[in-house]
Image: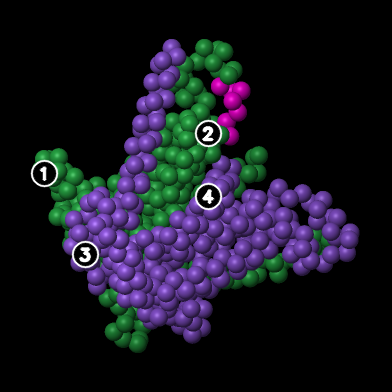
Amino acid sequence: MKEKKFYPMYFIWPALIIYGLLCILPGIIGIYYSFTDWSSYSDKINFIGLENYKYIFTSGQDYTKYIYNTLMFTVVSNIVKIIPALFLALMLREGLKGQNFYRGVLYFPSVLPYLVIGLLFRSMLHPTTGVVNQVFGALNMDFLAQKWLTDPNFVWGSIFAVDAWRGIGYVMTIFIAGLQSIPESYYEAAKIDGAGYFSLLKHITLPMLMPSITINVVFGLTYGLKVFDIIYVLTNGGPGRMTEVVATGIFKEFSDGTYGIGSALSSILFVFMAVVGILIVGRMNEKKVEM
Amino acid sequence: MKSKKQLTTLAKHIVALFLCTLVIVPFIIILLNSFKTSKEAALMTLELPKQLLFENYATVIEKGKLAQSFVNSLIYAIVPCACVVIFCGMASFTLSRRITKLNKFIYMFMILGIFVPVNYLALIKIMKLFSIYGSRFGLILFYIANNIAFSIFIIYGFIHTVPREVDEAAIIDGANPLQLFFEVIFPLLKPVLVTAFILMFMNIWSDFMTPLYLINKTNLWPMNLAVYNFFGRERANWNLVFADIVLTALPVLIIYLIGQKQIISGLTSGAVKG
């Protein structure tokens, strides 16, 4: 009785309605539009069944590459961020003078607008006037100077490097918080039993760090699969369409006015992420019940 | 033994300093070159400028229409943040105090938004239906929607730290639900609300994709789009581009320096509990 009165349902409505209407509903309507020939060229929208999906997967266009690139970006960008960040966190965990300064500086890039990062690195990686190639030139190592953002051999490497520059501090900060929640007494007890550094790492640190590892993987997964900004500002999908991902591909379809195909691409991502999300949220919920 | 430990510490400092240099040096290059002439800046060196050309900044602000877009960005960030903090505070309060099957489902449905991407094409269709596409109001409403999931996630986790006895005392004193929430609970949630506000503010300030889809009039552009457009026109003049970068990064830097503690605590409070 009392609960109903003092924790009213109308407290939930504003958030739920706005969120449902503008975040979830477009995804669901979008699935319907993905079965149509919706475009900017005609006012009529006709149902065409699976044609858009057929076109995406069998037309020999680059669409399958967008999907491959997105998955590849998700896997690689997370590996190159999470592993170094873990070592950094272990290093900056305790007792280093000035560690707060180090942490503050290393975290900073992850709050910068992508546009700033994009312009910054487009200038620094510029083939002729960029700082990076000039340094190589000054050191008489011209053979190392490359067209970082336009050479197919280097463009993904450059993207991953810039993405790591931006994101390592963020991942590291989550690890440090996880490390700080491990009671010191565990280590003391293990040390009395004669455990060495690697034994402590394997039997105490890593198992106790699982929640932070999980959260980093989960955030990394959603970031990678939805990636748009860093690609758009660094290469805009180029050279050619080599670094195009699903989100930038959808934007291209939007610019071209082929909304049906764009909706199909978007729906593939939507359904995939919804399934991943439901699995993760379900797991989180189970864990809370256990605790 | 002792000297080995000192050696490791020294090695740690060297690694940490090296990495910090990698972060800081690009900014120093940008800052220095933003005061140079176009010719000097094209060389992109660490040399000090021969004379400080503050007029680069004046040029950028005038030519790039930065004043207008700065105000736009402020509106697009502050209004949604304030609304989200209130709406999500209220929703999380009921959701976490009255745990029913339905409310559990609503909670999970809402944090699902952390994962699923928005279909902008269909979103535009819906916005046109309500005649809010391309307007300030439409963009603001979308920013509110898009930040609800993450805010519910971190606020919901925090509300448990406010004991139920607080509610009961207020109810005995004769508070109604609105008084209970806004006069008693809301102030107690301040730490997590401030954190949510700052995180959202920086996300919206950085967001590039949404205005590309939802805003088509140049006078409604946020700073990001104005700067990108300016870069497209003036890419030969690196000094101006750099001044532009400095001006875009400055607000974020200031907020970061002020709110660093909240940012990190907020980031990790949701994170460590998993």
Indicate the position of residue B223 as horizontal and vertical percent values. 40, 70
> How far, Cα to Cα, is label 4 from label 1?
41 Å
Question: Which range of residues does the magenta coloring cover?
Answer: A181-187
The answer, for residue B28, to whether it is visible in the render is yes
Q: Say yes or no: labels 4 and 1 on the same chain.
A: no
Residue reaching furthest to the front? B51
Query: Disc 2 residue type?
Result: Leu
Screen quadrant of the N terminus of chain A: bottom right
> How far, Cα to Cα, is label 2 from label 1?
43 Å
For label 3, the residue is B38
Figure check: B3 above or below B173: above
> Which quadrant of the figure has residue A38?
bottom left
Q: Are marks 2 and 3 in contact (CB under 8 Å)?
A: no
- The one nearer the camera, B185 or B122, is B185
Depth-wise, is mark 3 or mark 4 nearer the camera? 3
> How far, Cα to Cα, is label 3 from label 1?
25 Å
Could you say whether the residue bearing mark 2 is in a helix, strand or loop? helix
For label 1, the residue is A142
Indicate the position of residue B83 as horizontal and vertical percent values. 60, 69
